[in-house]
Structure formats: structure tokens, C-alpha cells
Image: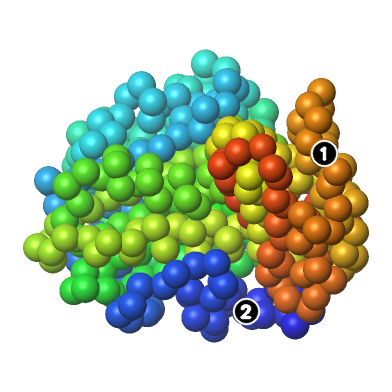
Amino acid sequence: MSGFGDIVGGNGRDSRPFFNSRWVEAPVDFEELDPSVLPRGFRAGAVHCGLKDDGGTDLGLLVCDEPEVASSVLLTRNAAAAAPIRVCRDHLKQGSVRAAIVNSGNANAATGEQGLADALAMRDAAGIALGLDTETVAVAETGVIGVPMEMDRVLSAIDGLAEGLGECGGIEFSEAIMTTDKWPKRCTLKSGGVTISAQAKGAGMIEPDFATMLCFVQTDAIVSRPEEALRRAVDASFERITVDGQMSTNDTVVLQASATSGLDLPDGLLDAVLLQLALEIVADGEGATRVGRIEVTGAADGEEAELVARQIANSPLVKTALLGRDPNWGRIAQAAGAALAGSDIGELGPDVISADELAGEQREAELGLKLDRGEGRAHVYFSDLTHEYIVINAEYTT
């Protein structure tokens, strides 16, 4: 298989099974449903309000109709966080999120106090249209940084959007949050008697621990500790990926659980869903054709292993070797040495570096580095670096 591009159809990647990565352990017993269908108690929809010039949908709304929804929200730690992040940090009841209003086409980042006022106005309009406490409405935005919002277009569309929400709005919502994505990232699955849906976006400005992405997860399961469940799943998924090592201003993850099934969320289900979505983001990494996984073992501790793994995953030399199917293990050695500059890590060679899959035809390549410094280990998923990535980002606003 030549790469990811040859499996993307007019409907994105929905023609493939959702769980399609070698690195994801799918639930033992699950059913893949139409991704438009949301779990019981949820509705969603989308419209075009004019933030995107291509006429595509760019404003999405998601709501849980169950007043006792359990939720958790994780946000970027970027010091230049966008206005919607500040709203969610300071003005959102993060354990009781009933709805999310999301736009694409404008990140509303580096827009000053007016940007903050605009994000609050967007949230308030959605809350009023839905008849909700506005502090239970999350707001998320994605797109170009440093451009003022065209709020007349957004606010004029919210009432009609709220009136048109439906239980089968998952596809519309997933497409409204896309920017440079080539395909939507989404699923609806049934396992253990409960249903879980998720919609995510992301392709560029992706770095482990600060992935530029949006992800919304809905389930009819009982989730008694939503913050703990979401943090565990994100730690093993979105915080394990990189495309270009760039920290985001806008990344947001929202989990909502309506408990309408009366059943607990099956162990591992949320973890598997988020890992597959994270790998979809890497696979769609603005021109990417392959995904790599680098695992570092034998480091002095976990922190050191993490440092080395990220240095390798973000190395342009390693990423271009992944693109060119060049089993150049010397590039992995160089990146590891740079990460631990000032230390003596001994001789690195093919006996401790696994790089054979760089040369393979697999769309997913497993790489490894064995140090002899302790018991620390860490892994990172990363994309290759192509000419298309340069074109997309060189011409992003022009």
C-alpha cells in the first residue's frame, strides 16, 4: 500500500473499519454503527455561516438533553491560549457540560479582549437558543490565528442551527469542525450495551501533550469519574502524537456521558476510540503518507525516555527517511544524542536501533531504540514529512 491517500474516498475514511491500526487493541465485542447516529440523549447539527470561503459547513452545535450529564474537559496549556480556551477555563462548569458550540475557519486566537468578548457572545447565544445555563456550554474554535471574528455571521446563524439539531447529526458536526483535514475523524460504536460516538479534527500544528486538535466524545454509559477516565485515555492517545512539533493555541477535548443506558462504560473502550482517532490525525498530517511509532526503552527514567522519543519523532531527518523508505538508523542515533547532549550514552548502532521498517511498504512503521541507562520507556506516534506539508503551510493565509 503506497500510503494513506489511496484509501480516502468522497466520504473520508468511513469505507474502512474504524479500528484499522496495528497499534490499537479494539474491544473484543463491538458493533460499528453509522457515524451520523449519536447515543441516546444527544443531538447535533451544523450550518455554513460564512467563516469559510469554500461554502462548507463551519459552525457546529452539540447538545446533551439529559440535565444530569457527567462531563470532563481538557484544554491546551499554551501560554497564548485562544479566547475559547480562556472561556472554558474560567467560565465553564466543566463537570456539567450540556452543549458545545464550535466554529472552523477562525481560531479566535491572539485577538485580544474583543476575541474574548466574541467567544463569550458565541457561547451565550448558543445557551440562550438551547434554553441552557450558559456556563454549561463549551465553546471551541479552530482556523487562522490573529484574525478578528466575523461575529454577525456567527450569531445570526445560531438560532436556526439550534432549531435544526437531530439525533443523526454526527456526520454534519464532524465535517463542520474540519480545517486542513482531508477527511473527518469520527465513529459511533456499540459495545457492552452502551453506545459511544466521537468527532475529532486535526492535521497540522500537532505536538505530543499539546496536540492541535478538537475532539468531542458522547456516550450513553455511566461514567462515574469522567475526568479520570478522559485523562487516562488522552495520556495514551492525543498526548502521544506529533506531526510537526508545534504547540497549539486551541486544542480541546470534551467528554459527555448521559448515563441513559444505565450501564457502565466498558473498560478500555474510550482508550481505544481516542487512540484510533489520534492515529487518524497523524495519518492526515498535512500531506502525510506514513505513520511511525518510535519506542525508547532502557532510559534513565520515563522523563528521559519521553525526551528522546519526542526528539526522534520531531526530527526532519527521521521524518523524511520515513517518507523515502530509507532505513537510515544513523538519523535516529543523531536525534537521540541531541536529546541527551552533554551525556555519554555509549555507541549507538543497528544492534540497539530498530529501523528496518523505515524501508518497508507498511503504512505504519515500528521503530525502536534500546538504551542502557535504566528502566525508563516511552513511545510517540509521528508522521512523515512531505512537500505537501510545506505547500499547505507556506500558503495557509495567502
Task: Characterize the local packing of mark 2: few (<14), some (14-19) or many (20 or more) Cα atoms within 10 angstroms.
Answer: few
Relative to 45, residue 255 above or below: above
365 left or right, relative to 317 = left
Label 2 sits on residue: 10
Dot placed on the residue nearer the N-terminal end, 1 or 2? 2
Residue 25 place in picture, x, y as percent? 44, 69
Q: Quadrant of residue 366?
A: bottom right
Q: Count the labels in the image.
A: 2
Residue that label 1 marks? 346
> In what quadrant of the picture does the N terminus appear?
bottom right
Outermost residue, left direction?
262
Res 3 seen here: yes
Dividing the image into 4 quarters, which one contains the C terminus?
top right
Q: Residue at x 52, y 20 (%)?
A: 114
The reply to whether the C-beta atoms of the residues labelled 1 and 2 are less than 8 Å apart is no
Q: Secondary structure at mark 1?
A: loop
The spot of residue 155 in percent (x, y) is: 43, 39
